[in-house]
Image: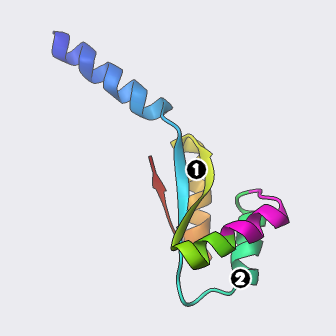
Amino acid sequence: MKEKVSEKTEVAVLEDQELAIVLYNDDVNTFDHVIHCLVTICGLEPQAAEQCAYIVHYGGKCAVKHGTYEDLEPKCTALLENGLSAEIES
């Protein structure tokens, strides 16, 4: 019985855990396209989106949006549909 209680607690903690969309560098997309996607899909301000684009370009990846899985999943899917490389990480 204790295992089931522990299991339920662990699931609840994972659901409440703050996650991030991590955007990865590629050799395909232009800065303008990446910035446009970050502004329109993730709701970043243009200057913040530009900074993220440069971090991705020079650092290989950047966490561009934080939140719950339910909030991030449609945004990450939209980024992928727009040709960007992204995933949700903890």
Q: Earlier in the sequence, mark 1 or mark 2?
A: 2
Q: In this rendering, does residue 84 appear at all?
A: no
What secondary structure characterizes most of the magenta part?
helix
| Residue 63 image offset from top left, x and y in percent | 57, 57
Residue picked out by circle 2? 31
Tell me whether circle 1 and circle 2 mark residues in contact (CB < 8 Å): no
* Residue at figure coordinates x 73%, y 68% from the top left: 51
**Residue 77 occupies which quadrant of the picture?**
bottom right
Return the x and y of residue 14 as percentages of the image width and height.
Answer: 40, 33
Instruction: State which mark lies toward you, 1 or 2.
Output: 2
Amino acid type shown at disc 2:
Phe
Task: Describe the element under mark 1 as helix, strand or loop.
Answer: helix
| Side of 77 where 45 appears, left or right | right
Task: Write the residue at 57% across / 90% down.
Answer: 28
Q: Is residue 7 left or right of residue 53?
A: left
The quarter in which the N terminus is drawn is top left
Q: Position of residue 5 (x, y in %)?
A: 26, 13
Label 1: which residue?
72
Q: Residue at x 41, y 25 (%)?
A: 12
Report the magenta residues as a range. 43-52
Name the amino acid type tagged 1: Leu
